[in-house]
Amino acid sequence: MGTKKAALRAAFPLTLPILAGFTVLGMAFGVLLTRAGYAPWWAPLMSVVIFGGSIQYVAVGLLTAGFAPLYALLMALMVNARHLFYGITMLDKFRDTGKFKFYLIFGMCDETFSILATTPPPEGVDKRWFMFFVTLLDHLYWILGSALGALIGGALPFSTQGMDFVLTALFAVIFLNQWRDKRGRISALIGLAVPAVCLLIFGADTFLLPAMGALLVALTVLRRPLERGQNPV
């Protein structure tokens, strides 16, 4: 029990900023899903079993647009393709995690990856329990936000018009942070240029999947130069 408490105490302060962000973003998702006609319990359930962040926002539109399982599968793969790189990066860290490994893989998200990849556990704290609690706390924050949003969306009569812009705003902030880091400007420009070209070629209704696929290929090919912070052109 002492091992678990020490790991929880070490993990909790690191996840407090994520608590604030996930609560707001999760609430927006819960409100949107409830206003789309789904019962309030759907939002926390999706957050428990999917925990996909941006793909859960996309799923609201997919669920209301009709039955298209292949399109939904491809969209989910493309939107979350960045997790492939996270997974490769974390292979060594997760190698000896035993019973924790499956949940650590399932619960990996951008914010959890940032903590686990850059912050070692304090001296004397068990690494496996530390990684587990960071992952679990972040997951619980998202579930909490989703549940609160679903309850609010089902109880309060207000318009949700424009609320789906929260995801666009999130990606805009991520882009600006990437741009501020001069080493990340090439990948940021690729992220702008490739979708713009696909938009011109495929049109507004069908450009998203080709754009995500092209981005995956481009970033995979240029991965090593980008990691070194060099201009590959």
Image (cartoon, helix red, strand yellow):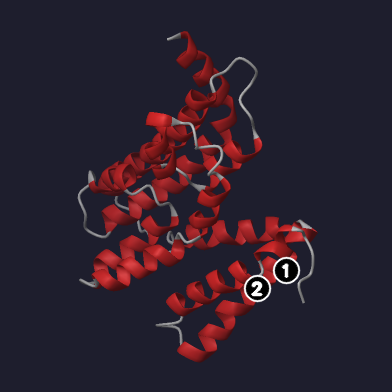
**Quadrant in which the N terminus appears:** top left
Q: How far apart are labels 2 and 1 at the CA level? A: 6 Å
In this figure, what is the number of numbered marks? 2
Neighbours of disc 2 within 10 Å: few (<14), some (14-19), many (20+)? some
Residue 11 vertical placement versus 201 (above, below): above
Which of 203 and 72 lies nearest the eye of the viewer? 72
Instruction: Kindly tell me whether residue 150 is visible in this rendering.
Output: yes
Q: Which mark is residue 177?
A: none
- On the image, the x and y values in percent for residue 215 come to 56, 72
* Image point (40%, 45%), residue name: 27
The reply to whether dot 2 and dot 1 touch (C-beta < 8 Å) is yes
Position above or below: 151 against 83: above
Q: Residue 186, which numbered label? A: 1
| Image point (35%, 58%), residue name | 159
The amino acid at mark 1 is Ile
**Residue at 60 percent of width and 73 percent of height:** 218
State the residue position of label 2. 190
SS of the residue under disc 1: helix
Q: Name the quadrant containing residue 121.
A: top right
51 vs 172, nearest the viewer: 51
Q: Residue at x 52, y 84 (%)?
A: 199
**Horizontal placement of 188 versus 12: left or right?**
right
Q: Is residue 161 visible?
A: no
Within-10-Å neighbours for mark 1: few <14, some 14–19, many 20+ = many
The amino acid beneath tag 2 is Ile
Coordinates of residue 19 in the picture (x, y in percent): 50, 35
> Residue 168, how many percent across, how many down?
52, 63
Left or right: residue 24 compared with residue 193: left
